[in-house]
Amino acid sequence: MKTTLHEIQLPGRVQLEFAEHGDRTGTPVIALHGVTDSWLSFEPVLSHLPADLRVLALTQRGHGGSEKPAAGYRPADFAADVAAFLDVMEIERAVLVGHSMGSINAMRCAIDHPSRVAGLVLAGTMPWFGRPPELLEFHREQIVPLTDPVPEAFARDFQRSTLARPIAASMLDGFVAESLKVPARVWRDAFAGFIGHDFSLRLREIDVPTLIVWGRHDAFCSAADQQAMLRSIGSAQLVEYADAGHAMHWEEPRRFARDLSRFVHSVAAVAATA
């Protein structure tokens, strides 16, 4: 099944790049990447997915080939883009798949636009990324001082930090190249957005089926964070990847695709009998 790239203008908002994979009549799945990534973050997964899933992998505002406005990098802004995208694409409800920052934006969308979300897959997540002191320190000491052009070595080290095991050099090079498309101001603003906006107490409002995917060697999100997620979202279940890190969908794309497709099919089956 071929993956095709498109651009779309969200009325009154931004122009976004997105990749489409699967049958257009299939169950809609919206994929939201992590900070400084793009739709390419999900490319390793797409080829392993069944054709009956219509996967739309967005490049979120400020990233990759999407428009890079001067402002609007809070989780609520990204979530509003998703709702506007669903409107333009004439999709009533979709399963949202979010990795890292994308998981925060997916949760925010489920809170702000609950009628548009059929289910959530949250990979490399925690209730609030502003809680761990090491992330606050990284933001303050490494992200805030960034200037253009962002050093290639910095982007490469950042992407490597998400891995527990090496991936193909060409794959890593592609992810680094996408990070280098992101201006320093967006690195700063996007990090400030998901670190600075704590809506963790509102996670209890989420009542759709939710799959939490965690790599045991995640350098950012701990086992305690996953238990906190399970306590916060009553409908959630946890799948652990024993040998993976924060970017488990890069390290184990075939397994991630299998877990994703099983979850989406279960959500679709329940919806069909409702």
Image: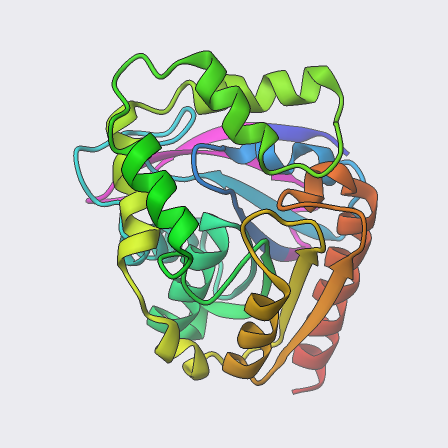
Identity of the residue drawn at 22% across and 45% down: 72
The answer to if 120 sits in the magenta stretch is no
The percent coordinates of residue 4 (x first, y second) are: 61, 29
Image height of 11 relative to 147, above or below:
below
Image height of 40 relative to 46, above or below:
above
The percent coordinates of residue 143 (x first, y second) are: 32, 32
Image height of 47 relative to 264, above or below:
above
Give the magenta range: 5-27
Position of the C terminus by quadrant: bottom right
The percent coordinates of residue 107 (x first, y second) are: 45, 65
Viewer-side residue, 17 vs 228: 228
Q: Quarter-wise, where is residue 122 in the image?
A: bottom right
Identity of the residue drawn at 60% across and 38% down: 162
Identity of the residue drawn at 28% across and 50% down: 193
> How are the residues colored?
rainbow
Image height of 228 relative to 153, above or below:
below
Viewer-side residue, 118 vs 216: 216
Viewer-side residue, 139 vs 22: 139
Identity of the residue drawn at 66% across and 31% down: 3
Horizontal arrangement in the rendering, residue 225 relative to residue 86 (left or right): right
